[in-house]
Amino acid sequence: MNIEAQILTLIRLLQALDASARPEDDSLTLIGIALVLAQLADIRAEMRQDLAALGDELAGHRRHMNDHFAAIQSELYRLAGLRPK
C-alpha cells in the first residue's frame, strides 16, 4: 500500500477517534490510539527499510558510474597519447 494512503488513513482514523471520544469511553479511545500508534510504527519501519534500500541502490549506481568514468578517462588519455595521473 502507498505510504501516503496509509498516512491519510491514519489521519482519518485519528479524526474519527477524536470525534467519537466520550469521557466514559476512555478504554475504547486508548485501544484506538494504541492501534494507530502500532500502525505508525509499522509505517516508520517500512520507510526505514525503503530508505536503506534506496541508499544501497544509490551506492551501487555511484560505483557503476565511477567505473564508467574511469574507463572513459583512460580511453581519453590513450587517444591523446598521455599517461594517466
Image (spheres, rainbow, N blue to C red):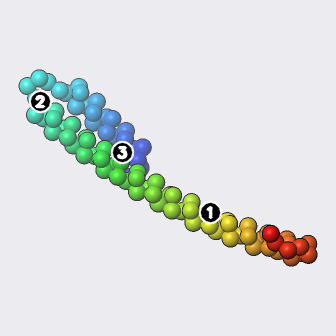
Q: Which mark is residue 6?
A: 3
Q: Is residue 21 above or below residue 45?
A: above
Give residue 9's position: percent from left, percent from top: 33, 40
Q: Nearer the viewer, residue 74 or 41?
A: 74
Element under disc 2: helix
Give residue 35's position: percent from left, percent from top: 21, 43
Within-10-Å neighbours for mark 1: few <14, some 14–19, many 20+: few
Of the numbered discs 1 and 3, the one sitting upstream in the chain is 3
Q: Tell me the residue that label 1 is attached to.
A: 62
| Amino acid type, residue under disc 1 in the picture | Arg
Q: Tell me the residue that label 2 is attached to.
A: 26
Of the numbered discs 1 and 2, the one sitting upstream in the chain is 2
The nearer-to-camera label among 3 and 2 is 2
Element under disc 3: helix
Element under disc 1: helix
- Extreme front residue here? 85
The nearer-to-camera label among 1 and 2 is 1
Q: Quadrant of residue 8?
A: top left
